[in-house]
Image: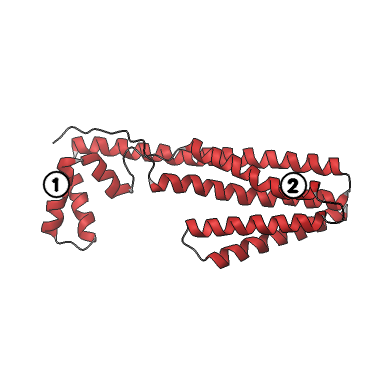
Amino acid sequence: MQKVKVKNLHKQTMEERLNTLRAGVLGSNDGILTVVGVLVSVAAATTDQFTILIAGLSDLLACAFSMASGEYASVSTQKDTERAAVAKEEGLLKTDWDGEVSAVRAYYQEKGLSEKTAQSIAEDLMAKAPLKTIVRVKYDIELGHYLNPWDAAFASLFVAALGGILPLMAMILAPAGLKWYATILAVILSSALTGYISSKLGNGLVKVAVIRNIVIGLITITIHYGVGRLF
């Protein structure tokens, strides 16, 4: 049996890039909805621009850092799980080599290959790159490529802030008679963009995702406006 080596690779895989983009999209959507919710509630209760600005800015910062910390914790847990799985397989390669080869063979048999062909492929792959082969077969892990919690956290932080700042700027900078229209338009445009990007990342239906996000944004505005008017 060949000595197991873990090669450190620096080029990001598609999964790593998509994880960062996913965190950014989720952060943007959350930033839009939470900030506009606070803005509309406060603006419906008072016309004082400074109060509206402080409320919106405080919520924007809180939302951005909350999303970032949540992504960091979530992706860190996933990374720890992946590392634990790799460590487990390193041990099994030393104590149960035949069982690991059998696992690879079974994987290719499930793909429709004959037992003889699957056994030949398993032996060849395990002779060349045992750890890389077994973790890919068992856990769909690309050896040396672990999801980076810092990438996800920073993506979520900055994009959540960007998503929230659009309706905030519309509410604060637009003329008094147009601020509501400007805010609604900002929410529609930013929600539509988020829906479009998320649908492309998930291979979903673009039209459905865009409409869904816009409707959710408008419902958020309506609910929080009603809450603000109560006070």
Residue nearest the viewer, comparing 135 with 103: 135
Q: Which mark is residue 168?
A: 2
- Residue 45: x and y, percent? 87, 50
Q: Is residue 97 in view?
A: no
Instruction: Work out whether residue 34 or residue 189 is closer to the camera in this orientation and state it.
Output: 189
Q: Nearer the viewer, mark 2 or mark 1?
A: 2
Q: Amino acid at mark 2?
A: Leu
Mark 1 lies on residue: 124
Residue 134: which quarter of the image? top left
What is the x, y in percent for residue 60? 70, 42
Q: Is residue 124 above or below residue 226?
A: above
Relative vertical location of residue 83 with respect to residue 216 in this rendering, above or below? above
Q: CA distance from mark 2 to mark 1?
A: 59 Å
Question: Is residue 89 toward the left or the right of residue 218 in the image?
Answer: left
Looking at the image, which residue is at 58% across and 39% down? Answer: 68
What's the amino acid at mark 1?
A: Asp
Instruction: From the top left corner, tell me how far across and down residue 138 is, in percent.
Output: 29, 48
Asked if the residue at tag 1 contacts the one at tag 2, i.e. Cβ–Cβ closer than 8 Å, the answer is no
